[in-house]
Image (cartoon, helix red, strand yellow):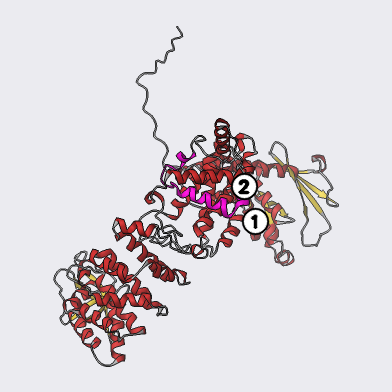
């Protein structure tokens, strides 16, 4: 009879004793006040009435004092006068505060107020202050107490830690996290924090090398921006603060332009039409040096239209229309202007190089810049709301004053290079963009620490390398394990095995020379064996020396009909390897020995000259007898040939996702009486 489902078997630990294996009734067993049970592994949470049903068989539990008693004892120790005792209590409190059961009991004892007063007093420093802030943040994150209860003096003290030029990293990190939680959880606290902390002060923390400090600082910047009223946002957007390009576009903070602090993508304010037109004019002037325009308005308009076409805009009459869609909006125009001004030689080379090609092979710079900006926004999640679950971090964005624009300049040159490598036409535009996306994604996955390292990694990811990586991954990863691919492989395998079989039989028809091995050491004699062309007879005979070419059947006086062959044996099972003297003398050739048994007392004995000939003959003889070819050479040839055949058949499916299931079969027609009326 199986045990009741409510009974679980667990191990319970307690100090000074070995763990005991007991059974617990999840329904009737209660807490042993003043003791309680906690998980021994992981977060070590308390077992409660609500969570006791989640205990599994084999779980290790630990006997501990109840959360109420633990909270009271820790609160008393925190308020003690001994520094060492207080530090140990704060360490334990920081660890226990993540448990919601303990947090509830500690908060009920006014524990948060006690911690806040310790911070406000300014008497805690270093490790003691770090543990105090950790415990405070963990307790508040449970949502049991409203953040609105935080006092102004507490906010000033925390903001002071952030504004200090030299402060412990652990204290700074926790202070930034507390301020972010205040801003996000309380509208009133936003105003108080905004009065104490400015974006300019936070920018200083983005210039350090500590990744966590950078992340928390940008998270606080985003929180201040998200909670700011609209008029305040506009002020923040156009302050043009020197953010030093340290905007890690993929961490949970992706609203601000890395340089100007302006919002990106679909949240960026539209640029005035006049400004857009001026920028487009400057792009044309830099590329074609068109300062001396003809006086005739019609001629000037025609010339501008021609220049805009050469610049690669989709709308030749009014290029500003190309920037109407968001994302990327005018962000693409900003990137193009940066390239034209700060990398003028590169910009002119790209534009003139493509405009001099024939129309179908030119790479349209304007269209490429817009699509590339959109792609980079998607890859780096620019313009999306902060995402706490995103852990991507790109240190290279902290190494340049204009990291975003420089990143675009590197990628637009990559796009132009890939276009030439692919010999692309206008119809291949989307295909080129897919390859460029893969190049950029793979390079970013290597976590380059600087833009120079990014360039180096992109140089190694040319179009040929991308094709090689795709084929390699297609052979080894999930796509090659999908049901359609497995089915295709199963269909190809018999054809490949038949091909290998024919090759083995053809080699047997060509024949091989073998050295004679016997008790009398007749090592100077040779013999030759070959299969007849109709695969029905084995011909063999002695030779005085190794042949220089093909040995005709007439010289091979002995023969064995294939139909008389009973079996093929190898190694120690061969008659000529069973004798002790032969085995001792030919120990090295034991792995190359095989014999054909065709009469109860007759055998044709072989010792192959090498492993390759051994596999050829074993496979060929197995094929003649209708048996499976199982040599190492057959397995190797089968893998190689199937791999090549699969690659050839899948070439046309490049960049096409292979479905897991076959497409549905359409319904049968209502009638099969198809007729055609040619009248």
Question: Foreground: 168 or 506?
Answer: 168
| Along the line of sight, the residue nearer the viewer: 608 or 318 | 318
The residue carrying mark 2 is: 348
Where's residue 37, x and y in %? 22, 77
In contact (CB < 8 Å): disc 2 and disc 1:
no
Residue 347 pos. (x, y %): 60, 49
Q: Position of residue 3 (x, y in %)?
A: 21, 66
> Was residue 297 drawn as part of the magenta stretch in this picture?
no
Q: Main SS type for the magenta part?
A: helix
What kind of element bears circle 2?
helix
Residue shown at 70% from the left, 63% from the top? 579
Q: Does the magenta stretch include residue 320?
A: yes
Across and down, in percent, residue 340 comes to 57, 50
- Helix, strand or loop for disc 1: strand
What's the mark number on residue 612? none
Toward the viewer: 58 or 230?
A: 230
Q: Nearer the viewer, mark 2 or mark 1?
A: 2
Answer with the quarter of the image where residue 532 lies: top right
Going 44% across and 47% down the picture, which residue do you hit?
328
Residue farthest along the front direction in this orientation? 295
Q: Residue 582 vs residue 429: left or right?
A: right
Which residue in the structure is indicated by mark 1? Answer: 570
**Can the viewer see residue 481 in this picture?**
no
Query: Residue pushed farthest top?
Result: 679
Give the total number of marks visible in the rendering: 2
Distance between the alpha carbons at the discs numbered 2 and 1: 73 Å
Q: Is residue 285 left or right of residue 666?
A: right
- In the image, the segment drawn in magenta is 319-348
Q: Is residue 564 above or below residue 261?
A: above
Q: Quadrant of the N terminus?
A: bottom left
């Amino acid at each position: 009879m199986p045990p009741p489902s409510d009974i679980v078997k667990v191990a319970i630990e307690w100090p000074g004793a070995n763990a005991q294996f007991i059974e617990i009734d999840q329904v009737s067993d209660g807490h042993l006040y003043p003791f309680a049970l906690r998980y021994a592994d992981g977060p070590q949470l308390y077992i409660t009435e609500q969570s006791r049903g989640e205990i599994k068989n084999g779980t290790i539990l630990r006997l501990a004092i109840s959360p109420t008693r633990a909270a009271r004892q820790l609160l008393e120790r925190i308020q003690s006068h001994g520094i060492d005792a207080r530090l140990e209590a704060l360490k334990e409190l920081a660890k226990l505060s993540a448990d919601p059961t303990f947090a509830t009991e500690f908060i009920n004892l006014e524990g948060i107020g006690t911690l806040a007063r310790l911070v406000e007093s300014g008497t805690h420093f270093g490790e003691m202050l770090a543990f105090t802030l950790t415990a405070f943040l963990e307790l508040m994150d449970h949502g049991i107490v409203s953040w609105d209860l935080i006092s102004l003096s507490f906010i000033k003290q925390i903001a002071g830690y952030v504004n200090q030029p030299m402060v412990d990293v652990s204290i700074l990190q926790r202070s930034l996290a507390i301020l972010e939680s205040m801003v996000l959880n309380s509208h009133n606290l936003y105003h108080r924090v905004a009065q104490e902390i400015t974006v300019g002060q936070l920018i200083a923390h983005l210039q350090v090398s500590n990744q966590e400090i950078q992340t928390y600082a940008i998270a606080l910047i985003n929180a201040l921006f998200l909670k700011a009223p609209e008029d305040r946002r506009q002020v923040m957007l156009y302050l043009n603060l020197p953010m030093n390009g340290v905007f890690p576009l993929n961490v949970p903070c992706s609203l601000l332009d890395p340089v100007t602090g302006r919002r990106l993508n679909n949240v960026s304010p539209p640029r005035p039409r006049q400004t857009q037109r001026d920028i487009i004019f400057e792009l044309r002037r830099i590329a074609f040096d068109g300062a001396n325009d003809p006086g005739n308005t019609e001629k000037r308009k025609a010339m501008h239209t021609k220049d805009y076409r050469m610049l690669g805009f989709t709308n030749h009459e009014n290029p500003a229309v190309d920037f109407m869609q968001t994302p990327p909006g005018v962000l693409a125009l900003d990137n193009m202007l940066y390239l034209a001004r700060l990398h003028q030689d590169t910009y002119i080379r790209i534009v003139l190089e493509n405009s001099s090609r024939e129309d179908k092979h030119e790479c349209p710079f304007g269209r490429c810049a817009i699509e590339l900006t959109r792609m980079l926004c998607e890859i780096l999640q620019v313009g999306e709301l902060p995402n706490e679950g995103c852990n991507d971090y790109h240190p290279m964005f902290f190494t340049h004053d204009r990291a975003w624009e420089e990143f675009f300049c590197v990628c637009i040159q990559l796009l132009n290079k890939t276009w030439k490598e692919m010999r692309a036409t206008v119809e291949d535009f989307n295909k080129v963009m897919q390859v460029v996306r893969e190049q950029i994604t793979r390079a970013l996955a290597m976590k380059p620490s600087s833009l120079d390292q990014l360039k180096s990694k992109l140089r190694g990811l040319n179009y040929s390398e991308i094709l090689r990586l795709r084929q390699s991954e297609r052979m080894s990863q999930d796509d090659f394990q999908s049901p359609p691919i497995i089915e295709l492989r199963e269909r190809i395998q018999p054809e490949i095995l038949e091909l290998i079989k024919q090759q083995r039989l053809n080699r047997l028809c060509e024949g091989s020379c073998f050295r004679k091995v016997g008790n009398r050491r007749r090592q100077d004699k040779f013999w030759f064996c070959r299969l007849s062309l109709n695969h029905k007879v084995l011909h063999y005979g002695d030779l005085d020396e190794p042949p220089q070419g093909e040995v005709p059947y007439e010289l091979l006086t002995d023969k064995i009909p294939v139909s008389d062959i009973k079996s093929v044996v190898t190694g120690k099972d061969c008659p000529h390897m069973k004798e002790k003297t032969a085995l001792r003398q030919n120990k090295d050739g034991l792995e190359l020995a095989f014999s054909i048994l065709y009469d109860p007392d007759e055998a044709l004995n072989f010792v192959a000259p090498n492993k390759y000939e051994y596999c050829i003959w074993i496979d060929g003889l197995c094929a003649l007898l209708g048996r499976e070819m199982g040599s190492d050479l057959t397995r190797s040839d089968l893998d190689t040939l199937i791999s090549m055949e699969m690659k050839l058949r899948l070439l046309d499916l490049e960049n096409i996702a292979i479905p897991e299931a076959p497409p549905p079969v359409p319904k049968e027609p209502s009638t099969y009486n198809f007729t055609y009326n040619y009248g």
